[in-house]
Amino acid sequence: MAFFSSDYMLHVPPHTDGKPPPVPQLKQVEFDTFSISGVVHSTKVRQIHKYFNLVGSHPYRLPFSQRSYPPNATLYRIINALEAAHLSYGHPINTEANRRAAILMIVQPNNVNTCDERPIEEMLWQREIPTFRVEFAQPVLETTTLGFALELLFCSPHKPEAFEISVIYYRAAYDEAEYDDTGIAARVQLEKSRAIKCPSIDVQIASSKKVQQELATLGTLERFLLPEEAARIRKTFMPMYPLDDTEAGWVGRELALNPVTAEKYILKPSKEGGGHNVHGYAIPAYLQRIPQEHWAQYILMERIEPPPDIDNSLLSFRGVSSGPVVSELGILGLCVWDEGERDEEKVKDFGQSCFMFKTKASGVDEMSVVKGDGYFDSPWLV
């Protein structure tokens, strides 16, 4: 089981002065498979914006229609997908113990994403699916054990009974700082269990920036898709380079170390959570500070140049600011599949009407809402 998010921004290709600018193109920023946060907020923001417009509080008084203001069912689709995975797990192994199956949500301690996690937990309880939040990593080892058939047993400190875990829903364990000896032991225990993982560790690795860069290499997509399908998808890719010892890697190194060419690029490590990228002029100095043998852990991606003439107002704890903005559209995929099956009929897709929309000031490099750089938004189609 996995939730996927493919994030896109509008890109205006370079053009000659005096000529009309080319039509903006949709370009992929990244592809995520782990701890897709913001699904509750994005659904609520769409409802808020719709309400403001209907009661006349929106400053632009836009004419409402279902086509121009698309519905966002992300929250409800995620609940449906988790419920389907829970039911597909089947009955607990030890029927004599009379245990109930439950979903285990792995979360970070003291995290600000609680408001994005609690509604999912509560909606699952409303469907009579026991759902528990456990912090990573020591609490995982303290509250879970593996049974004789590798079933994951969870003992809540607030309930006397033990639950057999059907689905492990990760909202933590994606940052390398979480993997000390305790974190490694906790992840190994969870992965060894027969519970359905969302995502499994192989799906998590598939979202690394190195995989994204390799998929952009000519001939790679064609291994999985028809040539015409691969060509359409490749049009959304920005140029990307490795920084290893290959021929393409040496091209990437030359671009990254030259202050003039580096200005057009972003240096990306294979890390989740936002805020790890190095931008433009800062790339050469950054590479010189780290050991050269670590360069292969990064990819170099050409910077997306968004349209310059889009303005909006942004509200945060700092107040209201107005000016040029940049938006990012995340298209979500939600699916549950049978392990080892390649038959498409074995894949249950829950991704209809699932997206997230974020906006930031144009002068800000990152789009992380949690870190105060971006804002949840909703699109208006014209």
Image: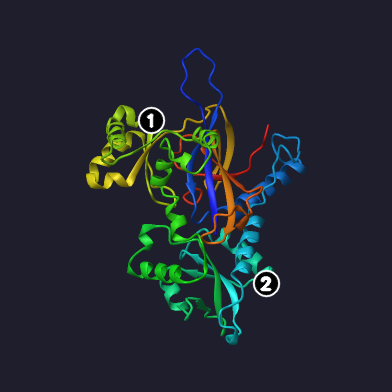
Residue 340: percent from the left, percent from the top?
51, 60
Residue 336: percent from the left, percent from the top?
58, 59
Q: Quadrant of residue 213?
A: top left
Helix, strand or loop at label 2? It is loop
Tell which tag, 2 or 1, sits nearer the viewer. 2
Between marks 2 and 1, how big is the CA–CA gap? 52 Å
Left or right: residue 98 versus residue 6 is right
In the picture shown, does residue 317 fall above or below 95?
A: above
State the residue at coordinates (44%, 49%): 274
Left or right: residue 16 versus residue 45 is left
State the residue at coordinates (58%, 86%): 97
Helix, strand or loop at label 1? It is loop
Viewer-proximal residue, 183 or 224? 224
Q: Which residue is mark 1?
A: 264
**Which sits earlier in the primary sequence, circle 2 or circle 1?**
2
Check the picture and name the quadrant holding the N terminus: bottom right
In the picture shown, does residue 132 fall above or below 99?
A: above
Residue 275: percent from the left, percent from the top?
41, 47
Q: Quadrant of residue 81?
A: bottom right
Mark 2: few/some/many CA within 10 Å (<14, 14-19, 20+):
few
Left or right: residue 75 versus residue 235 is right
Q: Which residue is mark 2?
A: 128
State the residue at coordinates (57%, 82%): 159
Name the kind of residue labelled 2 in the image: Glu
